[in-house]
Amino acid sequence: MSGEAIVAVTAGDAEAVDGAIDLPRGGAGTSRDGEGAGGFHLHGWADRAVIGVAVVALASGFGQFGLTATLGSVARHFGHVVQGSTITDRAGLSGTEIGAGLAVVRLASLGGLPLAGLADRLGRRRVMLVGCGIGLAMTAVSATSPGYWWFVMLFALGRPFLSAAAAVAQVAAAEETTSHNRASAVALVAAGYSVGAGATAVIYGLAGGTLGYRGVLILTVVPLVALPMIARLVSEPDRFIQFAASRTSSLPVFGAVARPYRRHLTVVVLIAFGLALVTGPATSFIYLYAQNVEHLPGIALSAMVVAAGALGLGGLLGGRWLADRVGRRPTAAVSMVLIGLSGVLSYSGGRIDLVAGYLAGITAAGAFAPAAGAFVNELFPTAVRSSVSGWNVAASVLGAVVGLVAFGTVADVGNRFSTAAEATFLPAVLLAGLVYLLPETMGHEPEWFWPKAATDERGYR
């Protein structure tokens, strides 16, 4: 449930670094001190198992963010830039055409739902690594596209695999850790994804004129080649191993979520939908807006991304601290509102507003990631946790598509990005209040909420 924030790696509790934690066998419920979780071998947030998952997320972010970072170059290459006042004149393609192309790419991520659901059958590790590899390969192939819609379709083919890998990475990080380490572990994975995304933007800002969008996308071959080495760091979480060993049947369909959990799932997907209404257009149009409308120099764009990394780090640290002390719910809700308001500021006009809004939005997204990531994974049992992450991806996709189409259409009609931002983002932030329909999970393990749902058919019906 996270946006494409540009952040750096976060720090965590000192006592968590000492090594893995063996929780004694006993009751299903757990408390803040980590006792009583059925014999799971759990880790500190900075242990090798969690770092490996974060590196997979980094590779996924590097592949997924390629289109967003290079969108200005893509529009100029496949369109026609002329002197004029319309978005089409300045960007090369119309806002509607750009929005539709981005919507197709986002819609392709719906395939992330069944792929993430596969992790509840085949395991977190296999789905993460295979999905990331296929996604990176397809992203590299998209660099050979002869036309705009060829590019959109080829890039879209890799999107569901990268989306599933990123979603399952957060699940794996949550499952590898105890409650007081979980927000830090999720923050680390979010940081990994964001560093990968930010690297794409920085490379394009510094060397885009030389490499072009094709060269930047071909660079996805680098993490693809490194994937076998990354795989050595990644292990299967004990929570899934024990669940798989005791399971007596297979899921009837991909992405199945049992009836007892559907009320929580409905609220979660509505929140994800609302957040994506903002983050979809806010992150997808921002580089095009900066490059083709505000004409921000490449060096300034790179500096903005680097500054966002520092502020994103602060957001992650602050969000982790608030999630563990104030609560998952208030941290997520307030952060979501700030993300929406920052998006409005970014497109209100002028370079100062653009930079200020972008940096504020990245900070808020950094705070949102650890709180929301820990929250969602603590709400559901192991049997359906990856499937829930898949539904989360699907809701985010649909929200982003609606947001992209609405934003692009309104921007075309009035030739004003500010009007499009207000019309799209402000209604969406109202959905942040839905988080209070869910129970606070701070200080609890997932097994505390669903003590009888750890194995077999109980997790499916």
Image (spheres, helix red, strand yellow):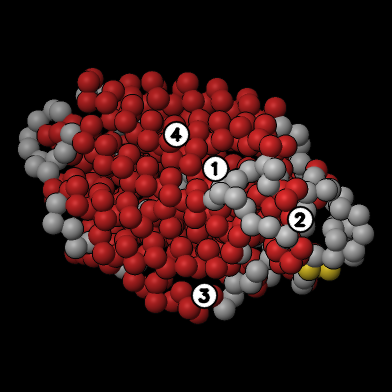
- Percent of width and height locating residue 98: 24, 39
Element under disc 2: loop
Q: Residue at x 39, y 61 (%)?
A: 135
**Disc with the residue nearer the chain's start (1 vs 4):** 1
- Percent of width and height locating residue 192: 52, 60
Q: CA distance from mark 1 to mark 4?
A: 11 Å
**Disc with the residue nearer the chain's start (1 vs 3):** 3
Label 2 crowding class (10 Å Cα cut-off): few <14, some 14-19, many 20+? many
* Residue nearer the viewer, 341 or 88: 88
Q: CA distance from mark 1 to mark 3?
A: 26 Å
Left or right of 83 on screen, residue 178: right
Q: Quadrant of the N terminus?
A: top right
Q: CA distance from mark 1 to mark 2?
A: 22 Å
Q: CA distance from mark 2 to mark 3?
A: 30 Å
Element under disc 3: helix
**Disc with the residue nearer the chain's start (2 vs 3):** 3
> What residue does disc 2 label?
455
Type of amino acid at the residue the image marks with label 3:
Ile
Type of amino acid at the residue the image marks with label 2:
Thr
Q: CA distance from mark 4 to mark 3?
A: 32 Å
Asked whether the beta carbons under mark 2 and mark 4 sit within 8 Å of each other, the answer is: no
**Disc with the residue nearer the chain's start (4 vs 3):** 3
> What residue does disc 4 label?
399
Type of amino acid at the residue the image marks with label 4:
Gly
> What residue does disc 3 label?
230
Q: Which mark is residue 392?
A: 1
Q: Quadrant of residue 215?
A: bottom left
The reply to whether residue 254 is visible in this rendering is: yes
Asked whether the beta carbons under mark 2 and mark 3 sit within 8 Å of each other, the answer is: no
Asked whether the beta carbons under mark 1 and mark 4 sit within 8 Å of each other, the answer is: no
- Percent of width and height locating residue 193: 49, 57
